[in-house]
Image (cartoon, coloured by chain):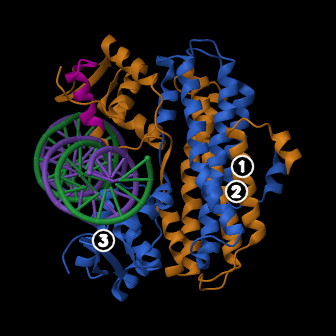
Chain colours: A orange, B blue, C purple, D green
Amino acid sequence: MSSAKMTTTSYAVLGLLAIKPWTTHELVQQVNFSLRRIWPRAQSKLYEEPKKLVALGYAEDQEEWIGRRRRTRYTITESGRDALRAWLSVPGDGPSLEFEQLLKIDFSDSGSKDDILTNLAATLEWVQRENEENLVAGRAYLAGKGSFPERAALNLIGGRFLTDFYAMVADWAVWATKIVETWPEDPRGVPLDLAEQRAALRVAERIADLAAGVPASEHDAAS
Amino acid sequence: MSSAKMTTTSYAVLGLLAIKPWTTHELVQQVNFSLRRIWPRAQSKLYEEPKKLVALGYAEDQEEWIGRRRRTRYTITESGRDALRAWLSVPGDGPSLEFEQLLKIDFSDSGSKDDILTNLAATLEWVQRENEENLVAGRAYLAGKGSFPERAALNLIGGRFLTDFYAMVADWAVWATKIVETWPEDPRGVPLDLAEQRAALRVAERIADLAAGVPASEHDAAS
DNA sequence: TTCTTCATGTAATTAGTTACATGATTGA
DNA sequence: TCAATCATGTAACTAATTACATGAAGAA
């Protein structure tokens, strides 16, 4: 029992181990395939974390030999399952976003209209790329061929979040492109589109009501 | 001219300096108020980065004295504006998401139905909190009282992204809560809701078409 | 006048990434 | 049989965070 501290990344790996035992390489594949979308981490981290779990008694490592080559398979322990359960019951942090393309768009009054359009196009390409795997996985589940079928219902919850996120990003990029295309070359001092500003405000007000538990109908009546 | 390397965070600060000169404290305020939503960084980083910009000749620092207390105001240089312009014209990275609450939900077959509902509730609270400032800023612009009015049109582009993101997250959390409420206490082996799976797939297919430039009407006709 | 909050930083630590190294397997 | 790629790691580095320190201003 070392004193190494469990981070969210440690628990992410522990959570994967709770599904089944994996070799490090399989862990890397699985993270690249799906987990990276909500918890992106470099490969080297995924070689590191399981060792920590073993040191803490949350996992066991078995050596396997492929020809002359060693690999390690990790299995969760009962104590690991307890730790995971405890972690799951504490509410986590809200979503945190890093969006460099939008950062550049936001500063484009120091640049050009083209910079904005280029970045919006890059965003659309990004969505298409990311959505691809989503589509494949979704179709597989419908065909009854998804991986971990016992987790299908749970997967739908998370999968729907990602799909909705991609849809939202794509719709936004298309909308923004249309608007910016009407702008002059120099994006400085473009007048504010009041109708669009009002539309955005209405969306924000609907969220406030929704989160506060106000039914949509009441809001409609009030406005 | 030191050899310190410019990171995205450096350019984020440089981009702020392009708007106007700021003291470090003002930079921290501004980032807490808005920039953190798309590029979250700790306060100490914001004390560090401007020094690097000065070392690179991208900014100048002026000492000011408030009583016996020193503070530093940073101003962008022409060379800094050039560097920013160059950076803006290179397409940035797509959005990167970290979402611990969803991570916990995703592993909840090792936990309980309650864990899921608790995390979804936490997500809704997070949205409400984040959306609050968005609402304030949006209303201010409509009233013609927004900060940096010359940036209003540009701000609407980024502001709309955030609003749509919050709306998407809130709608998803409400949807997921309704579904999970019908589940038994133990979320393992819950059967897949095929209608919902199909609905998700349709959304994913619409994105693929959208990004590929297929008009909505064609897709409707095809399906 | 004392307590709290605002303001300006620095220091210590760490989580994470990038780059490297090397063996095994596949296929042209 | 040679090149490319898959697989398994380690080492070096750095970006970023957390914690700490201290002075000034405002409130009670």
- Is residue B41 visible in the rendered image? The answer is yes
The CA distance from mark 2 to mark 1 is 6 Å
Left-right relation of A110 to A60: right
Residue A60 covered by magenta stretch: yes
Instruction: Say if labels 1 and 3 share a chain.
Output: yes
Q: Which mark is residue B50?
A: 3
Callout 2–callout 3 Cβ contact below 8 Å: no
* Residue annotated with mark 1: B206
The kind of secondary structure element at disc 3 is helix
Which stretch is magenta?
A: A46-62
| Viewer-side label of 1, 3 | 3
Q: Position of residue D15 (x, y in %)?
A: 29, 58
Determine if the magenta segment contains residue B91.
no
| Image position of A76 (left or right of B189) | left
Which chain contains the residue that carries disc 2? B
Residue A211, given in percent of the width and then of the height, sits at 67, 39
Residue occupying image coordinates x 60% and y 39%: A161
Q: Residue at x 48, y 17 (%)?
A: B111
Q: Is residue A105 left or right of residue B163?
A: left
Q: Are marks 2 and 3 on the same chain?
A: yes
Which residue is more in the foreground, C24 or B110? Answer: B110
Q: Are marks 2 and 1 in contact (CB under 8 Å)?
A: yes
Is label 2 in a helix, a strand or a loop?
Answer: helix
Q: Residues within 10 Å of mark 3 (few under 14, many from 20)?
A: many
Return the chain for callout 3: B
Q: Position of residue A55 (x, y in %)?
A: 19, 23
Graded by Cα atoms within 10 Å as few (under 14), some (14 to 19) or many (20 or more), the crowding at tag 1 reads some
Mark 2 = which residue? Answer: B210
Question: In the image, is B215 to the left or to the right of A166?
Answer: right
Q: Which kind of residue does numbered mark 2 sit on? A: Leu
The quarter in which the C terminus of chain B is drawn is top right
